Amino acid sequence: MIGIYDLPDAYICERCGRMLEGNETQLSYDDTLVCRVCGGDAVPAYRCEICEEILPEDDIEGSDHKVCRSCIEKKRYDLDFCAKVGEHEGTEVVLNSFLTEFFTESEINELMLTALKERSKVKPVDGLKYLRYASGVAADLLYSEEND
Ligand SMILES: [Zn+2]
Ligand SMILES: [Zn+2]
């Protein structure tokens, strides 16, 4: 999920597929950004950190780190990589206040990643699947998989 305050690297026209520079977009009557050439919707696009391709937001994952789906596809079982892309995408999780007294946020992240890697030795964890469900349902998925 991309934050609404992240400025896109470009816009891409949904209809003609053209990469739109600043002066190739215009506001339509209902205040949406459209392609000046064909009038199609201009969708925000971001540059993938790995392959550097600029792609529409639907094909990009991550917030601080933007990576396209096909690059994630290739590294979906690399949990360090997935954790990096998922950074700050936290769903609301209630942590034990006793533990948070003793561990910093980054220590807790580190411990959880270590635990996740242990789990993946038993059954590989598909990082892409969880990145896609990063908001809200990831915890439910993990829970239901444990109980299959
Ligand atoms: Zn167009
Ligand atoms: Zn990529």
Image (tube, rainbow, N blue to C red):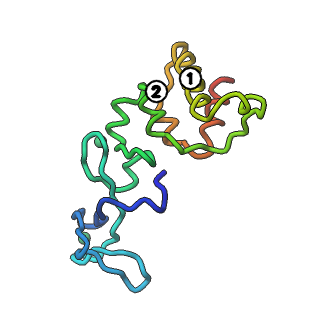
Specify the label residue 79 is tagged with.
Answer: 2
Task: Between residue 65 and residue 101, name the one nearer to us.
Answer: 101
| Whether label 1 touches label 2, CB < 8 Å | yes
- The disc labelled 2 sits on which kind of residue? Leu
- The disc labelled 1 sits on which kind of residue? Leu
> Does 3 appear above or below 41?
above
| Secondary structure type for disc 2 | helix
- Badge 2 residue CB within 8 Å of ligand 2: no
Task: Between residue 36 and residue 78, name the one nearer to us.
Answer: 78
Which quarter shows the C terminus? Answer: top right
> Residue 73: horizontal and vertical position, in percent?
36, 34
Question: Which residue is painted at 41% across and 25% down in the image?
Answer: 78
> Does 91 appear above or below 117?
below
Question: Which residue is painted at 60% across and 38% down in the image?
Answer: 138
> Residue 79: horizontal and vertical position, in percent?
46, 26
Side (left or right) of 123 relative to 40: right
> Residue 147: horizontal and vertical position, in percent?
69, 24
> Does 100 appear above or below 25?
above
Ligand 1 picture quarter: bottom left
Specify the label residue 20 is tagged with.
Answer: none
Q: Residue furthest top?
A: 122
Name the N-terminal-most of marks 1 and 2.
2
| Secondary structure type for disc 1 | helix
Displayed quadrant of residue 74: top left
Specify the label residue 116 is tagged with.
Answer: 1
Question: Which residue is painted at 35% across and 61% down in the image?
Answer: 8
